[in-house]
Image (spheres, grey):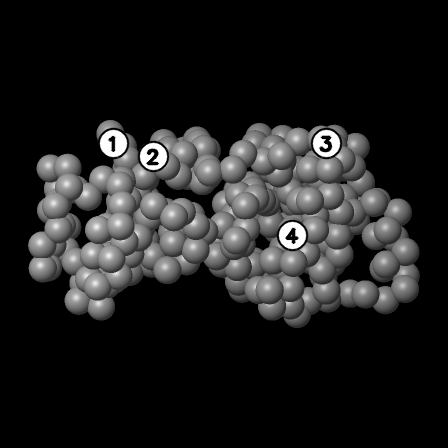
Amino acid sequence: MNTHHAVILIVEDEPLIAEDLASMLSELGHLVHGRAHDACTALHAVQVERPDLVLLDIRLNAGPDGIAIAKELQNIGVPFVFVTSHADDSTLQRASETRPEGYIVKPFELEDLRAQLAIVFARLDHRTGTTRTPGTFLVRDRGALVKLQIDAIHYVEADDNYCTIYTEDKRYVVASSLSALEERLCSQHLVRVHRSYLVDLRLITSLRERELQLGDRVLPVGRTHRKELLRRWSER
C-alpha cells in the first residue's frame, strides 16, 4: 500500500500524457494539484500552493524547458522528478546538474511509477527527518486540501468513477472507483458490503439478509459479500 498521499503538480505539454499520468497518480493515492504546460503556469502554481512534488517533462513546446523550470524549483526548495522520453547523454548531463529526486523515462507502467515515487518519498522523509502522517487521506473541502482521518469514515458510496465519503457530519466526493479507493484507504475496519458500498465494521448495529443498519442509515448488503461480512461482524 502506498502510505504517502502527496500533492503533486504535473508539468507536461501533451494533454493526453498529462491525463494518463494524473490517472495513475490518483490510482496510487496521490492528489494531482494541477497541470501546467509551460514554465510560467508551472511556477505560478508552485507559488500559489506548494506541492509536495513536481513531475516535470523536459521538452516543452514553448518557452523555457523543464530543466530551466527545475533550476527555479531548486532555488525555492520544491522537489521534482523528471518524466521524459529523452535519455541521451547530453540531456542526462544537463538534468543531473539540477539534482532531481528522480528520472522516469517514458513510456512507463503504473508499477514503475509506484516504485519510483516510493523511493523518492523515502529519500525525502529521511532527509527531512519526518514521517508522513499515517491513517490520513487527502481530500478537497471547499477548494482547500484537508487531511481526513481514515478512522473517521463511516461509509463510502460509489457512483461509477466517483465515490462519496461520509463521516459523522460531513461528506467528501473523490474521483475514484470503489475498488481503487478501498486499496488506497487500506483500513482493517472498512469492509466491502456491496458493489457500491464500503462500511466501517465497528459501526454496524444490526445485520439482515440483504441490508444492514449503520446508525440511522440502512444500507444494502450484496449477495457475494454477505458470508464474509457475517463472519467478520460475528467475530468482533
Does the CB distance between marks 1 and 2 fall below 8 Å?
A: yes
Tell which circle, 1 or 4, labels the residue nearer the N-terminal end: 4
Question: Which label number is shown at residue 168?
Answer: 1
- Per the model, the C-alpha gap separating discs 1 and 4 is 33 Å
Identify the residue shown where x is 53% and y is 62%.
20
Q: Which residue is mark 2?
A: 152
Q: Quadrant of residue 16?
A: bottom right
Tell me the quarter of the image containing the C terminus: top left
* 27 lies above or below 218: below
* Amino acid type, label 3: Thr
* Amino acid type, label 4: Leu
- Per the model, the C-alpha gap separating discs 3 and 1 is 35 Å
Residue 105 can be seen, yes or no:
yes
* 162 lies above or below 86: above
Tell which circle, 4 or 2, labels the residue nearer the N-terminal end: 4
- Per the model, the C-alpha gap separating discs 2 and 3 is 29 Å
Q: Which residue is mark 3?
A: 128
**Residue 108 locus on image (x, y percent):** 64, 68
